[in-house]
Amino acid sequence: MAVRRGEVWWVDFDVVDDGEIRKMRPAVVVTADALNRARRTVVVVPLATGPQPRPPIVVATPSAGERRVAVCDQARAVDKARLTRAAGTLSAPDLRAVEEGLRRILEL
């Protein structure tokens, strides 16, 4: 499966613990393309609708859809088998905002 950094995929998050993002929802791929080609897993940041953006944890991603936000503190590795269908690509400014959110919450 060809998966690229910045792409938005519908991901099956159904097997989770309390407090984690759950159900089928879109997520943006944030791993480097070389790793996306070489590994069975990718790192994604789930997208949600409704919450007000509160950077760096919840970052606005309007290119993913109206009222869509990236929930940066819920980034996780998932097997590519959990990716069900492609749903587009984030704009460059939106991807940079997600990257900045990840840098800030991880103190990178």
Image (cartoon, grey):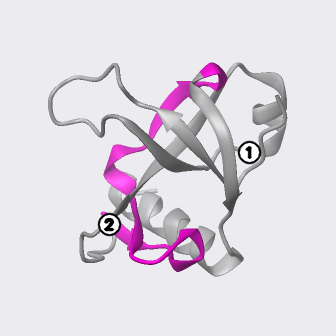
Which one is nearer the viewer's eye here, 24 or 91?
Answer: 24
Look at 46% across and 77% down and name the residue there: 66
Which one is nearer the viewer's eye here, 60 or 103?
Answer: 60
Q: What residue type is labelled 1?
A: Ala
When the figure is inspected, residue 36 is found, relative to residue 54, above or below; the finding is: above
Q: Is residue 55 left or right of residue 79?
A: left
Across and down, in percent, residue 35 comes to 76, 33
| The disc label shown at residue 58, or none | 2
Across and down, in percent, residue 76 comes to 45, 35
| The disc label shown at residue 32, or none | 1
Q: Mark 2 or mark 1, which is nearer to you?
A: 2
Look at 54% across and 63% down and name the residue there: 99
Across and down, in percent, residue 64 comes to 56, 68
Quarter of the image where one finds residue 1: top right
Q: What residue type is labelled 2?
A: Val
Quarter of the image where one finds residue 43: top right
Give SS at disc 2.
strand
State the count of labels.
Answer: 2
Q: In this view, does 74 lie to the left or right of 95?
A: left
Look at 51% across and 79% down and name the residue there: 62
Q: Which of pointers 2 and 1 lies earlier in the amino acid sequence? A: 1
Give SS at disc 1.
loop
Q: Residues within 10 Å of mark 2 (few under 14, many from 20)?
A: many
Is 70 contained in the magenta span? Answer: yes
When the figure is inspected, residue 68 is found, relative to residue 45, above or below; the finding is: below
Magenta residue span: 57-81
